[in-house]
Amino acid sequence: MTRRRPLELRARLAALESSGVWLRPRQEMIHRIKGTQDLLPGQIEKWQFLEQKARDLFARYGYSEIRTPIFEETELFSRSIGTETDIVQKEMYTFIDKGEKSLTLRPEGTAPVVRACIENNLFAGSGATKLFYMGPMFRYERPQKGRFRQFYQIGAEVLGSDSPDVDAEVIEMLVQFLQEVEILSYQVQINSIGCHQCRPQYLAALREKIAGILPRLCGDCNRRAATNPLRVLDCKVEEDQPYINTLPSTVDSLCEVCRDHFLAVRKALEKQEIRYQINSRLVRGLDYYEKTTFEITSDHLGAQNALVGGGRYDGLSQCIGGPEVCGFGFALGQERFVLALPEKDYSGGRLQIYLAPLGPECSEYAVALAARLRRQGVPTFLEFESRSLKAQLRQADRLGIPFALIFGLDELQRKEIQCRNMRTGSQTAISSDIESLLGWIRTRE
Ligand code: HAM
């Protein structure tokens, strides 16, 4: 026969049982996926700083924000980035959804932005459409410093103009961005890879030359020679370099239109006193580019040294079923910018006031005071648990909050609050009405 437990104990056991607390077996820890990061308080401030600076600057240049879905039809990327590229061949997160559709987590933002513009008829007005975006992208790459499988890009696209001034203005805006976030050590590299008119002849000449040196080149080059010969120029294998340097360069093989365009971009950059290097091997890893390509690199990032990549993509809209619309844009890697930022305090909107009620009898007053201060725009911290004054001041210190408002029942009866400067430890009694408190706080901002 089971012993009858007292009623109160039975109720407590039943509550525990229904909460599941004591019945749950200890489970194995689940970890984050390789190549991803948790962006934690203390680090996230740099991300927020970059995003805020970008929003402010892009607004000054007339860009509006666009947000596209994180997944798209796989064909959007295979058609635009190119079926023979590393991204499409090896790096996309592709899956079949429950409706048997092949979907892909976006590896980049340009094709989705152009798709969204076509679908929402954003090209309708005259003049250029200027859009910016920020958010996560996904590529199954080998993780290393500055290279992740989920990474964040901030990008901008200008659609509807083939003017070389667009190319120059975008690069000038990026140089301004670097200055405003205080990344002062970087190189701007530009190239022109021609257009659908002059590229076929160039590729024929390139293929012929590559065939002559193929046995000397690495396995990747041998594979690319057949599928995507332009990418042979991108080879980083040291032993290959003397041979690759003998290959014809894109800038020497441009048609008149591309040559004029490239010259005009260079002139416009020079007028703005923007220093650049021509890198005739800068072909980029996405097939949609025509004419100008560019990268901004930093020597402080190791192997993954590209802070920004971009270029012109005049044929992309048509390639995904849209009208003939020219485009130019870039994307910057936020993780790489975070690595390149100077070390300083990025915590902008930090807490200003710590409320230290002395005992649970003051907590109702504290909750009301916290709400009033926060409504007046004062960042205020209030602990949920009742704690000793010593523990509260220690917490205020740890959180780096500069001022504490201390009050017990005695102070509240006298309609006073002790205002403490946490740095110096000095304390002043101030009238507890909100105007006096706000006045005291504001004179210390
Ligand atoms: P992308 O060169 O592939 O271009 O990427 C742009 C930038 O994103 C790179 O320069 C780098 O900073 C960052 N990035 C790329 N892959 C990774 C990764 N696995 N981990 C961390 N950062 C990475 C594009 O994505 C084009 N959509 C840019 C563009 C916009 N062209 C015209 N408009």
Image (cartoon, helix red, strand yellow):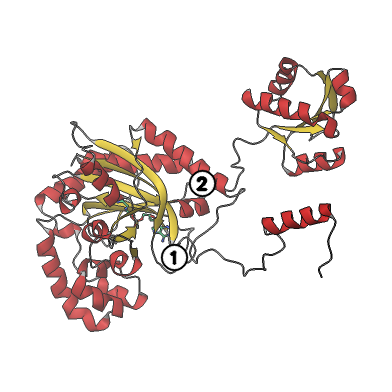
* Residue 425 visible in the snapshot: no
Residue 321 sits above or below residue 400 on the image:
below
Q: Residues within 10 Å of mark 1 (few under 14, many from 20)?
A: few
- Judged left or right of residue 116, residue 93 is right
From the top left corner, tell me how far across and down residue 185 is, in percent.
46, 50
**Secondary structure under badge 2?**
helix
From the top left corner, tell me how far across and down residue 96 is, in percent.
32, 64
Nearer to the camera, 199 or 352:
352
Q: Which residue is mark 2?
A: 47
Residue 365 sits above or below residue 95 on the image:
above
In terms of image quarters, where does ligand 1 lie? Answer: bottom left
Q: Which residue is mark 1?
A: 303
**Secondary structure under badge 1?**
loop
Q: Which three-letter amino acid code belongs to the residue tagged 1?
A: Ala
From the top left corner, tell me how far across and down residue 320 is, in percent.
18, 52
Q: Residue furthest right?
A: 410
Q: Residues within 10 Å of mark 2 (few under 14, many from 20)?
A: some
